[in-house]
Image (cartoon, rainbow, N blue to C red):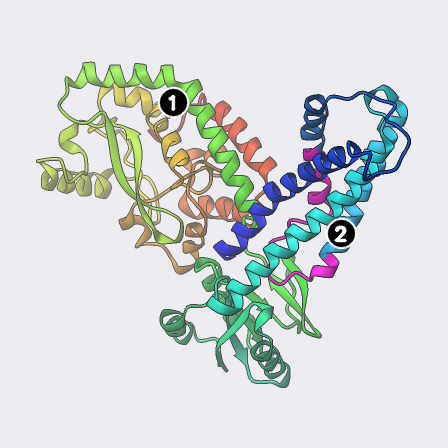
Amino acid sequence: MKKSELFFSAIQVPVDFLMITLAAASAFAIRNFPQIITLKPKLYSFPFDVYIKVVLMTAPFFILIYALEGLYSIKVTKKFWKEALKVFSATSIGLIIIIVAIFLKREWFSSRFIILAAWGLATFYVILARYLLQLIQRYLLCRYDIGVHRILLIGRNGKLGAIDRLIRQNKNLGYQVIGQIDSTHIRDIKEIRKQKGIDEIILCEPSIIDEEQEKLIDYCAINNIVYKYIATTLQTSNMKLNVLGDEPIIEVQHTPLDGWGRILKRIFDILASILGIILTLPAMLLTFLAIWIEDRGQGPIIYKNQRIGDNGKKFLVYKFRYMQWKYCIAKENPQLEEAIKFEKELIKNQSIRKGPLYKIKDDPRKTHVGRFIERFSLDELPQFFNVLWGNMSMVGPRPHQEREVEKYMEYHRRLLTIKPGITGMAQISGRSDLDFEREYKLDLYYIENWSLWLDIQICFKTVGVLFKRRKNL
């Protein structure tokens, strides 16, 4: 999903709100010009300040109807006439509901002219604003390639050739063919991606075996490439049917966390992190004080550890330090080499986890306060700020260290396709007691089946899990 598409789709909400409010204000103004509108004298007295308050409360109701009608779909190549019909239909539905409400409660408002005028003007204003936005978006697309989707075609039959010609002859479709190859060799695809960049891959080659297709799907998911194929015999439960030109085409959906899903999740993260900071501020202050008293300023209270986030980006995760400073793996530690050496010995002799991750049982490096705050995950409270800054999410796979990520199998890298989280499916299903392969499967389920309600459920369940004792500490 292109940033320009997200921007134009997101900006439609406030623009629609502004147009609806402007239409209502225009209707009120027109009604107050008797020299223009030759109607009988007004039989009501309704101050504008009271009227506009009603409008501002009613406008979000229309936005909701627009959303339910699919008017905020994220696509650069929307057909304008279909969108205009949807605006007319959605605005009319809102009008009918308002008329019914006024019929039941007539004292709320009594000017039928203003209601009808506002409906007509709102339809016109919203359609006009959307038309102008679409003109700007298409201009940026056709003139500067802003929002264009770079497509790699794989196959050698006639249908793929027809799609190639269709895209090349119609630039306003929003696609650009950057290459066409016969095979699904990942090495060749990596080279093309490195040189030209790839946003989408369309496969039309029935001879490709399932194993090769699985590798291609995993590669696309890991690198945030949309994977589509011209339907043959491949079946999948996570799919969306589209039409490109006259050809039916199926898109494999890696995760619902795209488009508006991503926007909703970010809004939830901001609100939840602010709430989390407010609610846990007393606990953070007490933890801060307890670490300082025990350690007497021998090291930083907030420990910054480099982790790997979405798309392989490195960032610093914040934690309350629960180890003695001389054992912390940080470049600021003057005894860093000894700390690394000691940690390697502990991993070799005392790690109880298999796979890329390690978990040291009876870790001698912890302080007295550290053992307590790790027991109840108080050490992770500063990560609410990571969420607020945007390099973590409330819910997602846990962020791992670079040396752990280097030990991933290729398919494990699907964990890096979304932002890491403070909590997740694995944390409410066993925390660090799970083996890595089980943790991966739980996190993959979350990625493929995300919903805002699932995030809310996981956050609530996490609170209960914190008070259950972990086996491996």
Secondary structure at badge 2 equals: helix
- Is 320 covered by the magenta stretch? no
Front-most of residues 438 and 463: 463
Question: Where residue 177 sits in the image (x, y, percent)?
Answer: 51, 75
Q: Quadrant of the C terminus?
A: top left
* Label 2 crowd (10 A; few <14 / some 14-19 / many >=20): some
Q: What residue span does the magenta drawing correspond to?
A: 59-82
State the separation of the CA atoms marked 1 and 2. Answer: 51 Å
Asked where in the image residue 162 lies, by quadrant, the reply is bottom right
What residue sits 51% from the left and 66% below the top? 148
Q: Which residue is mark 2?
A: 86
Front-most of residues 152 and 67: 67
Question: Where residue 187 sits in the image (x, y, percent)?
Answer: 38, 74
Question: Where residue 413 sits in the image (x, y, percent)?
Answer: 41, 55
Q: Nearer the viewer, mark 1 or mark 2?
A: 2
Cβ atoms at labels 1 and 2 below 8 Å apart: no
Give, as a three-letter code, the residue at label 2.
Lys
Horizontal arrangement in the rendering, residue 441 relative to residue 157 (left or right): left
Q: Which residue is mark 1?
A: 376
* 337 vs 322: above or below: below
Whether residue 292 is visible here, answered yes or no, is yes
Front-most of residues 461 and 248: 248
What residue sits 54% from the left and 64% below the top? 139
Horizontal arrangement in the rendering, residue 120 relative to residue 472 (left or right): right
